[in-house]
Image: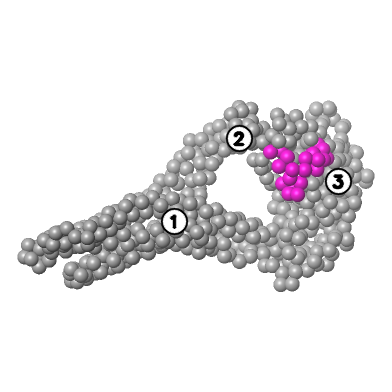
Amino acid sequence: MALTFRASPGHGAAYLACTVAVAMVPVAVAWLTKLVLDRLTSGAGLSSALVGLAVALAAAGVLLGIVPQIVQYVRAELGRRAALRAHDELFTAVERVAGVARFEDPRFQDRLRLAQQSASAPAQTADSVLEVMRGTLTLIGFVVSLAVISREFTVIVLAAAIPTVLLELRLSRRRAAMVWRIGPIERRQMLYGDLLASPAAAKEIRLFGLGAYLRGRMLAERRAADADRRRTDRREVVVQGALAALSAVISGGGLVWVVVAAGRGLVTVGDVAMFVAAVAGLQGALGGLITSMAGAHHQVLLFGHYVAVVDAGPDLPPPDRPAPLPALRRGIELRDVWFRYSDDHPWALRGVSLFLPHGATIGLVGQNGAGKSTLVKLLCRFYDPTRGAILWDGVDLRDVPVEELRRRIGAVLQDFVTYDFSAADNIAMGDLPALGDLERIRGAAVRAGVDDTLSRLPRGYGTLLTRLFFGDAEEGDPGHGVMLSGGQWQRVALARAFLREERDLMILDEPNAGLDPEAEHDVHERLRRIRAGRTSLLISHRLGTVRDADLIVVLSGGTVAEQGRHADLLAARGAYARLFTLQAAGYAAEAGGRDGPGTAGGRDGPGTAGGEAPAPPGAMRGVSRR
């Protein structure tokens, strides 16, 4: 209620006033009808009082016709404004979630989905509550009216309402529990539906003939959810049918009683009219009140998910006394860092101690699952270490406001986002102040080697990089939107990072993924120039990419297996030398198959003292994927 009335106090007050009017007008009509009939049957003839009553009755009828139309408009406008306010507050709360652990929690995803549903129609909850108030006012009016004629019958009607209220509330709790229970089922159903309709998945689904299989799984999930809904609906039909029958029996008995009483002269014709109107109104008010109470109860239970998200505490504890983050001058130290994603997960990092010197390029390598991406997440403070600390020139990252830390970091993440925006806006996502600054955006694109590609698009940098919808000037244009290749998207992601190239720390997580060997070599050289003199962390499976790093760190099983420069690590003949030799040997075999024996990878391969690579960095790409 507070949320709805905060969204639009004026419309909220108008809705409240209309609710009171809608509640009281039917009672007024019943009383005016009784008074008019009693005067007509009294034999007093036409009088100013009778005319006044008739005019009042007519005015009440006009209100009955007009007020619902006003209520409909006010309710709709209040709903729109409340939904806007609710979405703003909900996603402001989501934005405050500084880490990523909650987004990886299925229960949070279910709660967030239900919260979004509640945020789409918060006025429905307020509407249900106001309907309860309206029903209560109407009920009180008709109870008083009916009690004037028969207190005993009034008691009977109210007593019959008690089990109705209790049963309806129980049904509403069951329905809310059902909605929560089928949440994971509905998410899986949506997953399969999204896959079947996804442009990204269309090729593979058709190539492998997965359509019928995915459709079958989607329908199976739908059937499971429908079965749960069906059980709930059947229970409600039985209970509500029995309650409706009880209500009808009581109403019928009351009607017989009042007709007999009128025949005996115990009540007037006006009393009969009042009794009929009061019973009908009372039954209607009771039914409406009970339905509104059940609906409000159900809405409030669901709205609890919205409240849980909005009122959730921080996922990453903010510092009690925030420390300023100095410009990086010495380096970043990981001090005995342990981390696992939950108590049920194995350790992803186990006692990692590492120093990343200022101004140096650190290459981070290791097999899948070695802990490379986890280390990146900790540096960006998407998570906090389970044990140990990460120090930025001696300052613990947990003592620094997380937004201040992230302003100092530029990054190309391995799973970068392809936004359904224009080319210019896609690059500007790397640094929002660059929005609209085409000179900055184009400069970053030039450094990423993607300017020629984007400039040749139908609308240049204003071209949408999606076919999901039309842009402002593309309605009806069959050639709207462009789909980039994986390598082109990789360069767009690099351009985003180049917008932040002046940051203290640059993280490049598989920046050459998705590139052909020639493009990979080109990007490698561009990155080498950008990294010069800056602190950067370069993660790659292809060891030729990191061979010129100032320091190479090999992770294995969540620990630092070895570290040093390329030549030193080759000479040590440890894990790095073994991985490098395997990659180089694979490339040599490929080259030998094409050009004959004796080419790179023989006596002059990476195992020699000089440690020279048999091929440029880009040449390793195809081998690592084999």
Q: Amino acid at mark 1?
A: Gln
Is residue 129 shown above or below 191?
below
Q: Amino acid at mark 3?
A: Ile
For the record, the magenta segment spans 422-449
- The crowding category of the residue bearing disc 1, from other C-alpha atoms within 10 Å (few below 14, some 14 to 19, many at least 20), is many
Viewed as shown, does residue 555 lie left or right of 257?
A: right
**Residue tagged by mark 1?**
124
The label shown at residue 530 is 3
Q: Of marks 2 and 3, which one's residue comes earlier in the chain?
A: 2
Q: What is the number of the mark on residue 470?
A: 2
Amino acid type at image mark 2: Phe
Q: As rendered, which of 220 and 89 lies closer to the eye? A: 89
| Residue name at image x 73 percent, y 66 percent | 398
Q: Earlier in the sequence, mark 2 or mark 1?
A: 1
Say whether residue 382 is visible.
Answer: yes
Distance between mark 2 and mark 1 Cα atoms = 33 Å
Position of 247 relative to 449 (above/below):
below
